[in-house]
Image: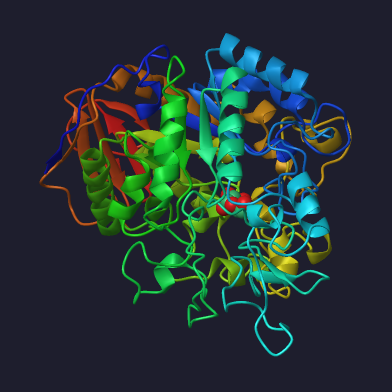
Amino acid sequence: MTVRTTTPDLSSGSPDWWRQAVVYQVYPRSFADADGDGLGDLKGAARRLDHLASLGVDALWLSPFYPSELADGGYDVADHRDVDPRLGTLGDFDALVAEAHRLGLKVIVDLVPNHTSHRHPWFEEALRSAPGSAARDRYVFRDGRGEHGELPPTDWQSVFGGSAWRRVPDGQWYLHLFTPQQPDLNWGSEEVRADFRTTLRFWSDRGVDGFRVDVAHALAKDLAEPLRDLGAPELSDADALPGLPPGTHPFWDRDEVHEIYRDWRRIFDSYRPPRTAVAEAWVDPSERRARYARPDELGQAFNFEYLQAGWDAERLRRIITDSLATARSAGASATWVLSNHDVVRHASRLMLPPGTDDGAWLLSGGRAPAVDAAAGLRRARAATLLMLALPGASYLYQGEELGLPEVADLPFEVLQDPVWEQTGRVRKGRDGCRVPLPWTAAGPSYGFGPGGAWLPQPTGFGARSVEVQDGAAGSTLELYRTALRLRRKLIEGEELHWAPDAPPGVLHFARSDGWRCVANLSAGPVALPPGEVLLSSAPPEDGRLGPDTTAWLA
Ligand code: GLC
């Protein structure tokens, strides 16, 4: 089977640079700390950009660095057009962008339009203002139900657990789909829309190349009175409500959300080259996701179906074929992602038996079921080479190039993710993938910074550091470097041709005559197809590819 798409110009000066880019996610708090306060910062990140350049990525995506009380790791933004003083200044941001551009790296920033921090001046003004005021209308305030308004307006649940409504002293309630410190904005307000246009121009004028749009599927809400109960208070996911026709959920993936992105596209396209964007939209099925990626909207959307597919050849084959076809029909390019700051790192996750609840696994400190770290790394390397051979853009998460596993056994008392408290301490949350990076074999916080690290790094972290892996034959860092260098040379179009004769459990496809990829997800070794092995995630033996191994062939 062949999936064909167009062959765009992917050079960094081309407006199409993003279509098959490799983007590296920097989670600033945990990347590098210049001032030694234990929290990563922009100066620290700027000094480490040579690592990204030597890795061979095209762009970096900076998770939020805006003023924030860190109620949700920076996704609670108090000012969308400034830098948190603990992370630096706007001058530091400009210096980082200049250094990135000097190294040939594009810069993508995170935009958080669904909510603000409760410390945002708008929300503080809303609290000081009367019910029904214009200040309250920038958010979603409602009277409660019950005789005295003592019950929340609807049964809607926060993604992190508990009611999505919180009461304020005068008796009204406000909506927060995430933490109570993240009140949802009202995108029906023209003032809100205008302010985000200003924000898009603010960062674009400072030279950023693109935006990652946080919770892109939640902005449009059905706020017509009376608000509708979902009737399933325990469920907060869009796809957990199968009875609802697509586009009709009161807040997830509503059809009107696309008007917002069509409006933004006009701003993106007013720059040279046009600014790019990628939607974080946890929506099913893939046709719904592809809508966010239409050329007159954001251009790309993260493919979480791929991330959640596990290590199952048939499932991956179906998702790859379907994702390429839907991206193509939307005029977009496909995206692939295995790890980010919200999920268990893939060196651990891919080892969990299908159906394992990540939350329960984390609660057991990663002991039930136990994950063999060496086997996890082997599988992660194979998964990465498979991903990097697919047509479209790949998104990497800091530390995966070191093969870092999830730090599943963080003690409860150090946890900072709001998920832990908001679920009544039943889910540990996402701190285990946010532990500050090890840069050096030894020293304070393994080179993360001159002081400590805001989350404890595990013993033995130094052995996985950049310093130890740099130049070491067979290291995961060198595997990523070689893969990215080769990929740059090998990419021709956006085509993928499945080989018709792959044995069960094996994915085998050609990108071009000079580039084929074979991934063995089966339990035993398989014969390597004829050809020269360009790169493999583990050495082939006697012409056979072992289990959990991927090879690129010419
Ligand atoms: C996105 C972010 C996540 C954050 C949430 C609320 O899903 O990736 O980290 O908690 O939005 O902003």
Q: Which residue is drawn at 79% across and 32% down?
A: 87
The quarter of the rendered structure image containing the C terminus is top left
Q: Can residue 474 be seen in this view?
A: no
Q: Tell me the quarter of the picture where residue 348 sits.
A: bottom right
Q: Which residue is drawn at 74% across and 86% down?
A: 148
Q: Nearer the viewer, residue 338 or 459?
A: 338
What colouring does the structure picture have?
rainbow
Query: In the rendered image of this protein, does residue 381 appear above or below residue 57?
Result: below
Q: Which residue is drawn at 67% across and 39% down?
A: 64
Would you say 440 lies left or right of 538 here?
right
Q: Nearer the viewer, residue 121 or 378?
A: 121
Residue 255, image x, y percentages: 36, 55
Q: Tell me the quarter of the picture where residue 369 sits.
A: bottom right
Q: Which residue is drawn at 60% across and 48% down?
A: 341
For the view shown, which residue lies furthest in the bottom direction?
147
Would you say 194 lies left or right of 482 here?
right
The quarter of the rendered structure image containing the N terminus is top left
Query: In the rendered image of this protein, does residue 129 appear above or below residue 552?
Result: below
Q: Can residue 426 be seen in this view?
A: yes
Residue 387, image x, y percentages: 37, 40
Q: Which of 549 and 413 is in front in this view?
A: 413
Residue 108, image x, y percentages: 55, 29
